[in-house]
Image (tube, rainbow, N blue to C red):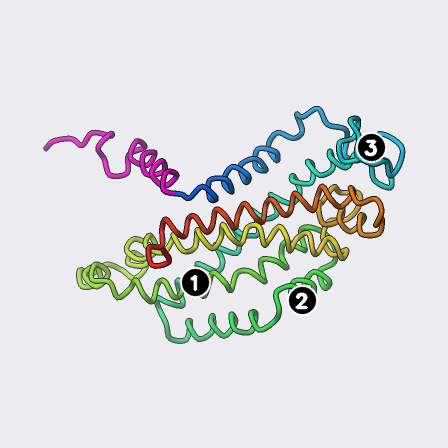
Amino acid sequence: MAMTSPDTAGFSPRRRFEGTRDIWRRLPITAKIGALMLLFWILTVLTVSFWPLADPLAMVGRRLQPPSTANWLGTDALGRDVFARTMYGAVWSIPIAVVVVACAVLIGSTLGALAGFFGGWSDSIIMRLVDVTVSFPPILLAMAVAAVLGPGLANASIAMVIVWWPIYARLMRAQVLEKRENEHVEAAVAGGAGSLRVLGVHILPLCWAPTLINATMDFGQVVLLAASLSFIGLGATPPSPEWGSMISEGATKFYSWWIAFGPGMAILSVVLATSFLGDGLRDVFDRRSA
């Protein structure tokens, strides 16, 4: 029997690289800009501790000084460097968004797949739970859960996962209901494949694209919601250099506009980046939206 070369195997590293390069080439320019902006913030999270920045918690000058060559975004009410705090704020906001989106996708997709594939009482219970959750406005539900659990990023993350998982449950359920009618799925069932094998091998691999697109676009919204919870005192607690809490401080210093300008622009860039990238991925993977 002839051996298959690694370079010609269907899932070889070379073919995966070529597929990724093809996706990048097909992305519109706005999506590429969004990807580069998001990559900048990811690299910031990983490397900011090595940057020649001031200590984000230390007083570096006089309080409420406007932007200057010494302090690019000025100083806050305690004399701390706003630019350094904005950069270090990514270490708080970006990982929280990654954890929340990953947990929401995992929980929601798992429950939605089970509901769509098995149906019956499992579908009824899961989807009624989804209906109850989405009946509340997301920000109000997140505020209520965070207020019950207490302030802190960990509790705010739990609140945001509770808000977001129903979105992926509905999305995955709809995808599974559509894909389980495909001929190759019916052939696998007729061939005696078990339910979990049919779901995991023949259905779920066809459902990842809409989930990826939605997760990419939700990433920026999670950053925005986390900042909103911190803004009202239900997220990060002082003196953490978190973007929402920095904006909350700046809101009380109207004439010291630079305090809120830095974190505000950081949040705006993340939201725009994920929106651009999500739209581009939708154009590439979802032909019906083109």
> Which secondary structure lies at badge 2?
helix
**Amino acid under disc 3:** Ala
Is residue 5 in the magenta section? Answer: yes
Question: Picture quarter containing residue 80?
Answer: top right
Tag 3 residue: 58
Tag 1 residue: 171
Q: Quadrant of the N terminus?
A: top left
Q: Are marks 1 and 2 in contact (CB under 8 Å)?
A: no
Query: Would you place residue 62 above or below residue 97 in this image?
Result: above
For the point 77% across and 55% down, which residue is it?
A: 233
Q: Is residue 124 left or right of residue 4?
A: right
Q: Is residue 34 left or right of residue 6?
A: right
Task: Decide which of 261, 238 is in the foreground and name it.
Answer: 261
Query: Would you place residue 110 above or below residue 127 in this image?
Result: above
> Which secondary structure lies at badge 1?
helix
Task: Decide which of 247, 4 is in the foreground and name it.
Answer: 247
**Residue segment shown in magenta:** 1-26
How far from the left and from the top, in percent, is residue 140?
Answer: 67, 67
* Badge 3 or badge 1: first in the primary sequence: 3
* Badge 2 or badge 3: first in the primary sequence: 3
Could you tell me how far apart the alpha carbons at marks 1 and 2 are, in whole angstroms?
22 Å
